[in-house]
């Protein structure tokens, strides 16, 4: 099935549900809202439904009126889009709505490890962000990209490329972004919203994470961590910590950067980044997670100390090979 099949399905259907993965990030949110606004612009009924609440840094995005809680999801869905998500289980509680729905699932993603779980799978690992696939679909549909859609999709590319610094900052990432700017996205305003506007307590919490810096393996590996009580006593929601791992990657000579955050249920959220010489997707997969070769993650049950030991052990094995 191809992009034109998906376009045909869109044209012949009138009610859509759009979702993505748990631990919502910029590509997930921007792609969802961009697609949903485009569908709304075509006169379609559409809802964006996620397990997670919208991270506050993305509250400036247009299209928030299309967000629904899973319990409010409409009963007349004809097609579901799952964006930027490697597997059904990573959708979280929204998986139940999809599994019992009996409607086609369009899986649009850019992760190599995507499990091809959809009725239609549009997976392009060389795309810098899932948002690029959304843009391709809008173009296939012959629809214009409104300034609001451009804002959502530009935000997705900005976040997914780590502000145009990661190795997925391809020619396509830059040309697509330039095109989105021409269509109305405002780079400075978007960057100010995504990376600025942090509550003082959030900046202090990042400071606590930075103070935890450990450098090991002759400087190859850097690690930051935050315990559950640190996050809870700050009153800051964990989603405000998106990107903290990049500070660990900023240490000179670092080849692999790790950020460990203890979640409330005793599970550790692991974020991994690499300078391009180590495939962190492979490491994350060893812990039931995934991602890209330079940016990957996992949720690992255990204590901080235990998970730290296991992750560092696994990285050491790869580095020592
Ligand atoms: P982050 O570290 O920013 O949460 O995620 C980096 C990349 O890894 C993103 O592409 C994200 O979707 C992916 N990722 C993070 N955690 C998981 C996980 O638990 N499972 C899978 N399959 N991918 C993950």
Image (cartoon, grey):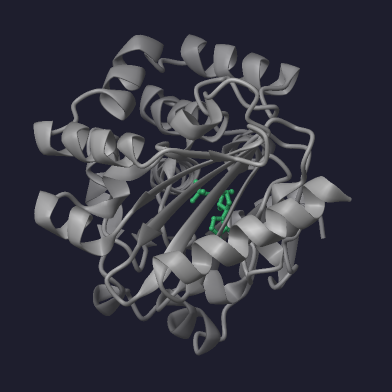
Q: Quadrant of residue 125?
A: top right
- Residue 301 higher or lower than 122, as above or below: below
Q: Residue at x 36, y 28 (%)?
A: 148
Dividing the image into 4 quarters, which one contains the N terminus? Answer: bottom right
Q: Position of residue 33 (x, y in %)?
A: 40, 45
- For image coordinates 56% across by 86% down, the residue present is 102
Classify residue 108 by image quadrant. Answer: bottom right
Q: Is residue 131 above or below residue 164?
A: below
Q: Position of residue 207 (x, y in %)?
A: 25, 33
Residue that extends furthest to the front in the rendered view of this protein = 218
Q: Residue furthest bottom?
A: 100
Apparent side of residue 284 relative to residue 124 in the rendered image (left or right): left
What percent of the width, then of the height, locates residue 67?
Answer: 28, 56
**Which residue appears at 20% of the width and 32% of the height?**
203
In the foreground, 267 or 214: 214
Residue drawn at point x = 70 percent, y = 64 percent: 285
Instruction: Tell me if residue 156 can be seen.
Output: no
Q: In x, y percent, where is residue 234?
A: 12, 49
Task: Judge by depth and name the residue closer to the eye, 132 or 198.
Answer: 198
Lateral position of residue 205 relative to residue 307, left or right: left
Q: Quadrant of ligand 1?
A: bottom right
């Amino acid at each position: 099935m191809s992009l034109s099949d998906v376009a045909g399905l869109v044209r012949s259907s009138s009610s859509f549900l759009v979702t993505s993965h748990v631990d919502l990030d910029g590509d997930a949110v921007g792609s969802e809202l961009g697609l949903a606004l485009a569908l709304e612009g075509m006169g379609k009924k559409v809802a964006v439904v996620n397990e997670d609440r919208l991270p506050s840094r993305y509250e400036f995005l247009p299209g928030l009126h299309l967000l629904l809680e899973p319990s409010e999801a409409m009963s007349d869905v004809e097609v579901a889009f799952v964006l930027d998500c490697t597997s059904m289980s990573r959708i979280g509680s929204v998986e139940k709505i999809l599994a019992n729905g009996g409607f086609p699932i369009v899986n649009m993603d850019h992760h190599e490890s995507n499990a091809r779980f959809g009725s239609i799978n549009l997976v392009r690992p060389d795309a810098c962000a899932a948002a690029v696939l959304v843009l391709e679909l809008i173009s296939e549909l012959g629809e214009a990209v409104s300034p609001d859609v451009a804002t959502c999709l530009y935000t997705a590319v900005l976040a997914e490329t780590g502000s145009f610094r990661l190795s997925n900052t391809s020619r396509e990432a830059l040309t697509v972004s330039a095109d989105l700017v021409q269509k109305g996205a405002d780079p400075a305003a978007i960057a100010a919203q995504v990376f600025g506007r942090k509550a003082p307590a959030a900046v202090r919490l990042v400071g606590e994470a930075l103070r935890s810096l450990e450098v090991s393996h002759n400087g190859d590996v850097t690690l930051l961590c935050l315990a559950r009580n640190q996050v809870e006593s700050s009153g800051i929601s964990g989603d405000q910590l998106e990107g903290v791992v990049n500070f660990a990657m900023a240490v000179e000579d670092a080849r692999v950067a790790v950020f460990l955050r203890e979640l409330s249920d005793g599970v550790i959220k692991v974020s991994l980044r690499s300078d391009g010489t180590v495939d962190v997707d492979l490491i994350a997969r060893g812990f039931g997670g995934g991602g890209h070769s330079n940016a990957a993650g996992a949720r690992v049950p255990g204590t901080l100390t235990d998970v730290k030991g296991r992750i560092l052990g696994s990285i050491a094995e790869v580095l020592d090979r």
